[in-house]
Image (cartoon, helix red, strand yellow):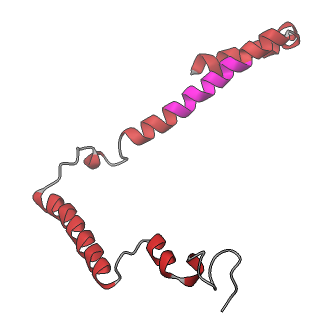
Amino acid sequence: MFSCNVFVPQLFWSRKCRQNLTLVFILSILVNIGMWFERFVIVVTSLHRDFLPSSWGYFKPTWVDVTTYIGTFGLFFTMFLLFLRFLPMIAVSEVKAITPHGDPHHPLGGAKGGHH
């Protein structure tokens, strides 16, 4: 990181380096790699550990955590089944087939049929 971001750009003080397009391209790629390493160091080290040393332990769920998690599944499925009980799930194709507009042979239905 230091070599790519500190030492490589110092070569641009030389006029010969600035006028050689191939060398400028290579140096710009090296600077870009150095900037990537700098972002990597910032992101990885900031996400590796929390700011408080007391928070550096690993999370191990207790029985309360596990049962609460399992309970959310039970609550979801209970609400889902209650939803299906009071508002049943019906396929749209079944509903469309029994309407006059869905039947092509009905006098009011089909693509060329009239409106009621």
Question: Does the magenta-highlighted stretch encompass residue 32?
Answer: yes
Image quadrant where one finds the N terminus: top right
Q: Nearer the viewer, residue 95 or 52?
A: 95
Instruction: Find out whether residue 1 is within the magenta segment.
Output: no
Q: Is residue 67 left or right of residue 29?
A: left
Asked if 48 appears above or below 78 in the picture, the reply is: above
Task: State the residue lying farthest toward the top.
Answer: 16
The part of the chain drawn in magenta is: 28-40
Residue 32's spot in the image, x, y percent? 66, 24
Q: Nearer the viewer, residue 44 or 113?
A: 113
Task: Name the residue at 41% across, 41% down.
Answer: 47
Q: Quadrant of residue 77?
A: bottom left
Residue 17 is situated, as x and y percent measured from the top left of the image, at 82, 9
Q: Is residue 114 above or below residue 55?
A: below
Q: Nearer the viewer, residue 44 or 86?
A: 86
Q: Nearer the viewer, residue 19 or 108?
A: 108
Residue at (27%, 76%) from the top-left corner?
79
